[in-house]
Amino acid sequence: MNEQDRPEDPVEERQPSGEDPADGAHPSFDRRYREMLGAGLDLLDQGVTVFDAELRMVAWNGAFLRLLDFPPELASPGVSFEVFIRYNAERGDYGPGDPDLQVAERVARARSFLPHVTERVRPNGQVLSIRGFPLPHQGFITVYTDVTEQRHAQQQSAHQQAELEAHIRARTEELTRANAELTNAIQSNKAITQALQRSEQRLREITDAIPAAIAYFDRSGTYRYANKGYAEWFGWSAREVEGKQIREVTGQEVYALVAGYLARALAGEQVSYEYTLTGRDGMPARASSTLVPDIGPDGEVQGCYVHSVDVTEQRRTEAALGQAQKMEAIGQLTGGLAHDFNNMLTVVIGNLVALKENHPNDPLTENFVEPAMQAANRGAELIRRLLGFARRQPLEPRPVEVNELILGMSKLIRRSLPSTIGVSTASREPCLVALVDAHQLENALLNLALNARDAMPNGGELRIESSLESLSVHAAADLEVPPGDYVQIAVSDNGMGMDGSTLARVFEPFFTTKQFGMGSGLGMSMVYGFVKQSGGGVRIRSRQARGTTVALLLPSIAEADQPDVLPAGSDVNAADLAGKLVLLAEDDADVRTVVRMQLAELGCAVVEAENGAEAADMVENIPAIALVISDVVMPGTMDGRALARFVRRFRPELPIVLMSGFAEAQASAEADPDLPLLAKPFSRDKLLAALRPLAA
């Protein structure tokens, strides 16, 4: 509340009910106390009101009037709670209805003096969080917080912080002067001391009810005040904190993090910072703090005010949102590239297969065609891994005995590492079964092993250890997975390790510490994306010069829950397709040439269409067409799925197969099992396997 907004007599303004200055309190002291209380309340960016047992106003601050848009003259000592409710009802804050009924209902609810937490949306769109707490003197305190921006963005903390700092700066000089006058008064009058104790108790009750950690320490680093929230944040009671040194209260670990900020604040600089400590539940907690110097009349720093807010959940949400945005960006990039790459690989692989089959005894085939085939297949696999990392490629999870997979991979890893690096494996359980895509898990382990190799240029030890881990609710929340049992695969090295800044960015796409040309920066991102898509989480611990441990946690299943393995189907046979007329719809001429060649080798006659509209005309006018195979993405108004809908309406007996290089198309196909989808690139055998059941 600004000075000009207060009545001329601050004693009368802040006089609580039931207290009379004539009871022994010195009027000058009581006036100063009221000024100090009013100034302290006005420093808060949250609205505060205190009403007594008769619902008469005892104390308030300017933020209360601002947040609820009350005129300053409406607030005065002893004014009834009903006055404010009626003011709101008559201006329509509670919506349509009888104002008298609205007032009666809310006054009756207030007289119950029950703790309550609620939110109210005002007509102007402002959202207020209202929390009421009963006081020992049969009154209640209510705290009003504007949470409008918090609901729309993650900027509430900075906004509240700036507002609080502005209030503290504006009132520091006045508060210092009032404190000096109060100290002189206490030394001269015993009765004033008793009154101060009563006032201090009431002020402590008010500050303890505020949802923030507030404290004050002097220039020697000794706490002189701490509210309940601040003391409990470090595991103390408020009375235990007072008189103790900062290092003793916060602990050595936190003190080492904030010592530099403390020195700057005691030198007269206002500072804001964040730090992490181990919370009371054993989990990491994040705090945002501001130190405001208390400058005396002589210009010297007397101490510092501390204001702290728990921002653990806010930072966790921001981090999750940032990671999700990065994943979405790389997913969009990868999804767009996949279609073109898969079309090119379809052409390359198809022509290489044809070349190999047409020249089976040519020695040049082994020297040139085979390496090209291997490179093309690796390119197709890389696209699948990129799509898997971006969560745009469906995985093929199945029960995998992890110990067996690790033993098999250890042989490949030993061959991939120099002789100066030893490889060892261990398991804490005889049988560990995880529901996971085995091929992707092998790629992840190989990727981690190669990273460990780069971290040990002079040799070292690589250890792969498996175990069964049971995640509690808190541990599971940190990994963003459900609590329960998980198979953990920990890959550890004793190499160079990582510093904090590197560790914070290790899963970012395209982030790498390797020299240019030595790494893409996608390895760890792919591992992270694969594990998250599998329903698991990743833990990573690293210390410089000590080494790194990356632990993959994957959903565990019991042996009794493993699905039975279905018998393999009969071998495909091209005889069922011989003589069939197949309509091939594909806009890419090179892809169309390769697929036509594969169909011809299967004995099919082929008619071609460059787009969906042309293919639909052929379906209408060529009754001999026995099968339709179409690309999903084609130019014009009719793509592959639209063509499939047309065929089902016009010739429902005519089978159709779609082919696509887009992962999204494969996900859509899972929702329509009656519409087979062939993922590009594909071989002739996969084409035959897709067409034969439809031609039978």
Image: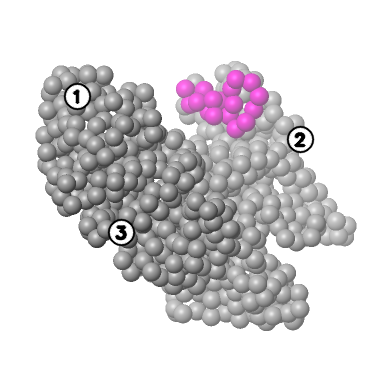
Residue in view at x 32 percent, y 60 percent: 187
Residues marked 2 and 3 touching at CB (< 8 Å): no
Q: Nearer the viewer, residue 517 or 275?
A: 275
- Please tell me which residue is depicted at 26% across the width and 26% down the height of the picture: 74
- Image vertical order of residue 206 relative to residue 343, above or below: below
Callout 3: SS: helix
Q: State the residue position of label 1.
A: 86
- State the residue in front, 450 or 71: 71
Tell me where residue 11 appears, x and y as whole percent: 26, 40
Image height check: is 505 above or below 451? Answer: above
Which comes before the other along the chain, label 1 or label 3? 1
The image shows residue 169 at horizontal and vertical percentages of 49, 44
Amino acid at dot 1: Arg
Instruction: Write down the region rendered in magenta.
Output: 632-649
Residue depicted at x 22% and y 19%: 90
Nearer to the camera, 586 or 45: 45
Instruction: Please rate how many residues cluster around mark 3, counting C-alpha atoms within 10 Å: few if below 14, some from 14 to 19, many from 20.
Output: few
Q: Which mark is residue 188?
A: 3
Task: Choose the circle earlier in sequence order: 2 or 3.
Answer: 3
For marks 2 and 3, give the CA distance: 100 Å
Q: Residue at x 27, y 58 (%)?
A: 189
Q: Is residue 281 left or right of residue 504?
A: left
Q: Say what amino acid the circle numbered 3 marks.
A: Ser
For the question of whether residue 268 can be seen, the reply is yes
Would you say the residues marked 1 and 3 are in contact, meaning their CB atoms lie under 8 Å apart? Answer: no
